[in-house]
Image (cartoon, rainbow, N blue to C red):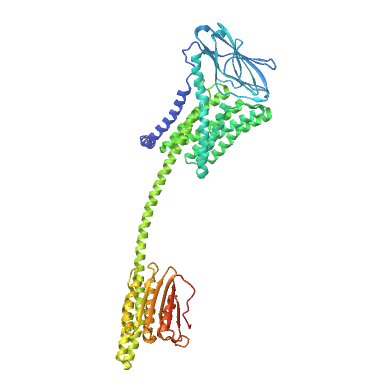
C-alpha cells in the first residue's frame, strides 16, 4: 500500500498530473461551452407576455378522428404511410391584446408545413405535401399577428397540413410580442439552420481537400477517414435545406440521412482510434457493423411495415452509436495523460462537443424535446469546432512537412557538399595519377624513340667506326643526324597550343642551312595550320621525323633545285605534303631501306595514310593524311605516276 502511495505521489505531482489536468480541462471546456451556448431559453423568463401553446386537439380530416394533445412538443406514430390531411387546434389565453403593439407566432418547427390561422384568420402559410410531392421543413417559422386578431381571454390557433409521414411531428409554439419572439426565432435559425449551411460548405471543402491528399498519399489512412467523415456530415446537413421531392423517394432520403449519420460517427471514432496509435480491429468491425444497422433497419421497416420512422429503434441505435465513441475518447484522453499533444487535445475537445450535441439531437429526434431547451438540433453548430480541428491538423502537418523538407534539403546540401569535397579530392588524386602516368609514358616514349632513333644510329656508327669504315665526312654526317634526332626528341616535349608549329619552325631552322649548302631552295608553307586542330605531343614526334627524313633523303639522293613543304590542318585531320624537282626514282623497284621503310612504319603507327609518288627524272612527292577520327586501317603504299 505504501508503494502505491509513493508511486501516486511521484506520478501525480509530475507529468501525469499535468496530463490529467489538461485532458479534464479540455473535456470540461467542451461540455460547458456547449451548455453555455445552447441552454439559453427560447425567450427571456421575465417576459410575462409570452404565451406558450401547450395543449390542444389534432384532427384527422380524412377519417374524422380526434386526439387530445396535453403538452407540446409531441410525437404520434401513425399507420402505414399515405397522403393524409390534418388540423391542429391550439388553445391559449391572452389577458390583454393591447399590451404589445405587434404580436407574433413562433413555431420552433413545422416539418410538414401548413396553413396557420389565428381565430379563423390566416396569418401565414408554409408549403405542404401533395399527393405526389413530399416536403420536410427542419427550421423555425415566424408569423406576425395583428393585435386586432386577438381576443381578450380565449384564443385559437389552427394549423392545417398534409403529410406522407408515418410519424406526426408536433413542435412547440409561442405567441408573444414580436420583438421578443423574433430574438428567439433568429437564435434558433442561426444555430440550427445557418450553422447547418456553414457545416455543409466546410464539409464539402474539407472532403475534397482531404480525399485529394489521400489520393496523393495513399499510406495516410487518417486523411481518408477524415474525408469520409466530412462527406457523411455533408449528407446530414442537406436535411436543413432539403427541396421538395417525389413522395416515393422520401423514405429513401431518410435512409440516406441515417447512412450519413452512421458514416460520420463511425469514421470519426475510427479516426480517433487511429490517432492513439492502436489498431483495435475488433472495435472497428463492431463499429462498422453497428453503424450499418441503422439505415438497413430503416429500409427493412419501410419494406415490411411501410413506416418511415421507428422512433424507439432509431433512438436506441443513435444512442448506442454515440456510446461507441466513449472508448476512443477515453483512449485519447489517456494518451494525453501520458504525453501531451495539442493535436490530440483539439480532437478531444471537438469530438466531446460533438458527442454531447449528438446526445441532445438524438433526444430531440426521439421525443421532440432537447436537453438544450428550444435551440433545436445543435450538432451542426458544433461542426465548425471539428472542422477547425481538422484545419489545425492540416496546418500543423503542412508546417511539419515544410520543416521536414527544409531539414532534408539541409541534409542533402550537406551531403552534396561532402560529396563535392570527396569528388574534388578524387579528381585531384586522379589528375595527379594521370600526370604521373603521363610523365611515365612520356619518359618511356622518349626513351623508346631515343633507343630506336639516336641509339640505333650511334650503335651502327660505332660499329662502322670500329671497323675503320667511316671517313671524316661520314662521321660528321652521322653525328649531325644524331643531333637532329636528339633535338626532335627535345622539341616534342614542348607544351602549349602552338607547340607543333614551334617544332616545325625549329626543324626548318635546323634544316635550312643544310638545304642551302646542297644548293636547294626551300618553300615552307605552314600558314594553313589551325591552332584548334593540332596533333598531340605523342603524334608530333613521328610526324617531325617523317618530315626530317624526307628532307634528309632529298639532300642525299634527289639532286633537286627546289623543295616544297606544305603542312595544313582542319577539323578533319592533318595533311603533310613534301615535293621536290629532283631526279626521282621508281618506287616499285627501289628496295625499302631504313628511310622509306621507317617513314611508312611511323605513318602506320599513327593511323595515317602515307603515299610516295615518284618516277625517274620527274621528282618526288610524299603525302601524309592523318585523320582525327578513327577510320579504316591505313596501309602505307607507293604509287608510280
Quarter of the image for the N terminus: give it.
Answer: top left
The residue closer to the viewer here, 278 or 94, is 94
- In the picture provided, is 296 more to the left or to the right than 183? right
Image location (x, y in percent) of residue 327: 50, 34
Please give left or right for residue 253 compared with residue 2 in the image.
right
Image quadrant assignment for residue 25: top left
| Residue located 43% across and 71% down the image | 573
- Which quadrant of the figure has residue 120? top right
Horizontal side of 111 relative to 332 (left or right) equals right
> Image height check: is 65 above or below 333?
above
Q: Where in the figure is residue 531, as x and y percent of width and height?
A: 37, 68
Tell me what residue is drawn at x 50 percent, y 42 percent. Answer: 213
Q: Nearer the viewer, residue 94 or 327?
A: 94
Q: Position of residue 91 (x, y in %)?
A: 58, 11
Can you see residue 586?
yes
Above or below — where is 380 with respect to 576? Answer: above
Q: Nearer the viewer, residue 45 or 602?
A: 602
User: Where in the figure is residue 287, as x and y percent of width and height?
Assistant: 56, 36
Examine the rendering and report whether any part of residue 269 can be seen.
Answer: no
The residue most toward the bottom is 468
Amino acid at each position: 500500500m505504501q508503494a502505491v502511495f509513493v508511486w501516486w505521489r511521484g506520478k501525480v505531482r509530475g507529468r501525469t498530473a499535468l496530463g490529467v489536468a489538461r485532458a479534464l480541462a479540455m473535456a470540461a471546456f467542451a461540455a460547458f461551452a456547449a451548455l453555455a451556448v445552447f441552454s439559453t431559453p427560447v425567450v427571456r423568463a421575465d417576459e410575462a407576455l409570452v404565451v406558450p401553446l401547450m395543449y390542444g386537439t389534432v384532427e384527422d380530416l380524412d377519417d374524422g378522428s380526434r386526439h387530445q394533445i396535453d403538452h407540446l412538443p409531441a410525437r404520434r406514430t401513425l399507420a402505414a404511410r399515405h397522403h393524409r390531411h390534418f388540423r391542429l387546434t391550439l388553445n391559449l389565453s391572452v389577458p390583454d391584446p393591447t399590451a404589445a403593439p405587434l404580436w407574433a407566432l413562433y413555431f420552433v418547427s413545422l416539418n410538414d408545413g401548413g396553413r396557420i390561422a389565428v381565430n379563423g384568420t390566416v396569418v401565414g402559410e408554409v408549403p405542404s405535401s401533395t399527393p405526389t410531392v413530399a416536403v420536410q421543413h427542419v427550421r423555425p417559422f415566424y408569423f406576425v399577428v395583428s393585435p386586432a386578431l386577438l381576443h381578450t381571454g380565449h384564443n385559437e390557433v389552427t394549423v392545417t397540413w398534409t403529410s406522407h409521414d408515418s410519424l406526426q411531428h408536433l413542435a412547440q409554439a409561442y405567441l408573444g410580442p414580436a420583438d421578443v419572439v423574433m430574438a428567439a426565432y433568429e437564435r434558433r435559425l442561426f444555430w440550427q439552420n445557418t450553422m447547418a449551411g456553414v457545416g455543409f460548405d466546410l464539409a464539402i471543402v474539407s472532403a475534397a481537400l482531404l480525399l485529394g491528399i489521400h489520393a496523393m498519399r495513399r499510406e495516410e489512412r487518417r486523411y481518408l477517414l477524415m474525408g469520409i467523415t466530412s462527406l457523411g456530415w455533408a449528407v446530414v446537413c442537406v436535411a436543413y435545406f432539403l427541396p421538395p421531392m417525389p413522395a416515393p423517394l422520401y423514405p429513401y432520403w431518410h435512409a440516406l440521412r441515417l447512412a450519413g449519420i452512421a458514416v460520420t460517427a463511425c469514421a470519426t471514432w475510427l479516426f480517433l482510434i487511429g490517432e492513439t496509435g492502436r489498431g483495435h480491429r475488433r472495435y472497428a468491425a463492431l463499429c462498422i457493423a453497428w453503424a450499418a444497422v441503422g439505415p438497413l433497419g430503416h429500409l427493412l421497416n419501410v419494406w415490411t411495415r411501410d413506416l418511415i420512422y421507428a422512433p424507439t429503434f432509431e433512438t436506441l441505435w443513435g444512442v448506442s452509436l454515440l456510446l461507441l465513441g466513449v472508448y476512443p475518447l477515453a483512449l485519447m484522453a489517456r494518451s494525453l495523460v501520458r504525453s501531451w499533444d495539442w493535436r490530440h487535445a483539439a480532437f478531444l475537445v471537438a469530438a466531446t462537443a460533438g458527442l454531447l450535441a449528438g446526445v441532445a439531437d438524438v433526444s430531440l429526434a426521439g421525443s421532440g424535446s432537447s436537453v438544450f431547451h428550444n435551440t433545436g438540433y445543435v450538432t451542426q453548430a458544433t461542426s465548425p469546432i471539428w472542422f477547425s480541428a481538422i484545419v489545425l491538423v492540416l496546418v500543423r502537418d503542412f508546417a511539419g512537412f515544410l520543416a521536414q523538407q527544409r531539414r532534408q534539403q539541409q541534409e542533402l546540401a550537406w551531403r552534396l557538399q561532402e560529396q563535392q569535397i570527396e569528388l574534388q579530392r578524387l579528381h585531384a588524386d586522379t589528375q595527379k595519377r594521370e600526370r604521373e602516368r603521363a610523365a611515365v609514358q612520356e619518359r618511356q616514349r622518349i626513351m623508346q624513340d631515343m633507343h630506336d632513333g639516336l641509339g640505333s644510329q650511334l650503335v651502327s656508327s660505332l660499329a662502322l667506326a670500329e671497323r675503320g669504315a667511316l671517313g671524316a665526312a661520314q662521321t660528321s654526317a652521322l653525328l649531325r643526324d644524331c643531333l637532329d634526332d636528339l633535338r626532335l626528341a627535345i622539341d616534342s616535349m614542348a607544351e602549349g597550343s602552338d607547340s607543333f608549329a614551334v617544332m616545325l619552325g625549329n626543324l626548318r631552322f635546323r634544316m635550312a642551312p643544310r638545304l642551302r649548302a646542297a644548293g636547294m631552295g626551300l618553300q615552307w608553307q605552314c600558314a594553313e595550320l589551325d591552332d584548334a586542330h593540332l596533333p598531340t605531343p605523342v603524334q608530333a614526334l613521328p610526324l617531325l621525323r617523317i618530315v626530317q627524313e624526307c628532307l634528309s633523303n632529298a639532300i642525299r639522293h634527289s639532286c633537286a633545285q627546289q623543295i616544297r613543304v606544305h603542312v595544313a590542318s582542319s577539323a578533319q585531320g592533318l595533311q603533310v605534303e613534301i615535293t621536290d624537282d629532283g631526279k626521282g626514282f621508281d618506287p616499285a623497284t627501289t628496295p625499302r631501306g631504313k628511310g622509306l621503310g621507317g617513314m611508312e612504319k611511323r605513318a602506320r603507327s599513327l593511323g595515317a595514310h602515307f603515299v610516295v609518288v615518284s618516277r625517274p627524272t620527274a621528282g618526288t612527292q610524299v603525302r601524309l593524311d592523318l585523320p582525327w577520327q578513327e577510320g579504316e586501317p591505313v596501309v602505307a603504299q607507293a604509287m608510280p605516276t
